[in-house]
Amino acid sequence: MNQQTSYHFSFALFILFLTALFILNISLGSVDIPLKEVFRSIWDQQAEKESWSYIVVHYRLPKAITALLVGSGLAISGLLMQTLFRNPLAGPYVLGISSGASLGVALLILGSSVLGGSFTLLAQSQLLISIAASTGSFLVLFAVMLVSRQVKNTMSILIIGLMFSSLTSAVISVLAYFSSAENLQQYLFWGFGSLGNLTWNELLIFFLVFVLASAMVLPVIKPLNSLLLGENYAKSSGINIKATKNLILVATSLFTGVITAFAGPIAFIGLAAPHMTKLILNTSNHKFLLPAAALLGANIMLISDTIAQLPNSQYTLPINAITTMFGAPIVIWLLVRKKKMIL
């Protein structure tokens, strides 16, 4: 089997697993719904019981689609950051975008403890929480882009992002100190991450931003391969380094900003999925890595969500805990087995 055929075989397996996991995910939950009725609900919304159709169409299906978008977006973002900074420990949150979103939510939820009154009611709105997270991520993106124009070293941008994360964490700690126990609990639960809170209208906004960010990634596939050999080599190949960096930073920020706004700060996927993809495909070519990482990230997210919702149980575990417990041992095993890490 030549290398090209091997890649096609891997992609076929990723898509096959993704399809099976998607069907499994929408067929499991606290309410036992026969698989035939699940498909009937999707196609014509006429299941045997009206409540079954409502659960599938308005809860399980949006949640499964959200898992696809979240897993794919984080995996792509992580790969972009690891290549740009040439650092295997870089992830989608190194720019501080997620911290900015967390700060926006903290100001809304924890800040309502200080302001009280109607602000406490506003903090209960899922839409306002999403808007607060989006605003916070946008402000941090604007600050990072503004500062990055003053520095030429790529690693300096990484350090700036980490400093913004530390700064926002400090502000959140101060807000938490003066917050009530109820608001602290609400913020803590938001930090666990959740895929099941989106309406179809919110999912449409999520999808449109996802498509926009994906469109920005397409022009930088070839420059990404050149950046692996260093910026000097990329410049000698005629690549506009500044424009490429800006596209990568904006695309990553859009991915992480919209994911954090609608699903919370989801851990692990963005860091581990790119490494798992490289180890499975054994290549550094982003023409294959980007779509493969997106598919693998979506697979991992669906598996994690299926485990988290505890099939046929009324309880749902924190998705962040599942993504880390499920994925970290697999990455360790792959690295030990391969005995190397592809950058």
Image (tube, rainbow, N blue to C red):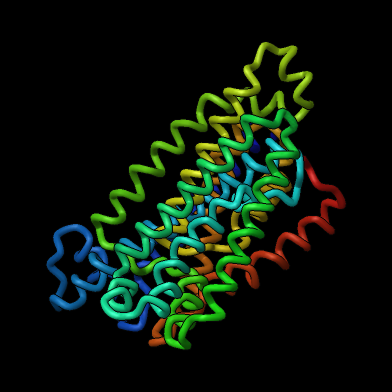
Using the image as rendered, state which of residue 177 and residue 309 is in the foreground. 177
Q: Quadrant of residue 199?
A: bottom left
Q: From the image, which quarter does the C terminus lie in?
A: top right
Number of marks in picture = 0
Q: From the image, which quarter does the N terminus lie in?
A: top right
Q: Residue at x 39, y 39 (%)?
A: 211
Query: Residue 171, position in %: x, y?
Result: 57, 66
Q: Residue at x 19, y 58 (%)?
A: 43
Using the image as rendered, state which of residue 301 and residue 139 is in the foreground. 139
Query: Residue 52, position in %: x, y?
Result: 21, 76
Query: Residue 72, position in %: x, y?
Result: 50, 49
Q: Is residue 126 left or right of residue 141?
A: left
Q: Is residue 123 above or below residue 20?
A: below
Q: Residue at x 13, y 76 (%)?
A: 50
Q: Quadrant of residue 315?
A: bottom left
Q: Is residue 73 visible?
A: no
Query: Residue 191, position in %: x, y?
Result: 51, 71
Q: Is residue 10 visible?
A: yes
Instruction: Name the residue at the front extreme.
Output: 115
Instruction: Name the residue at the right extreme.
Output: 339
Q: Is residue 179 left or right of residue 164?
A: left
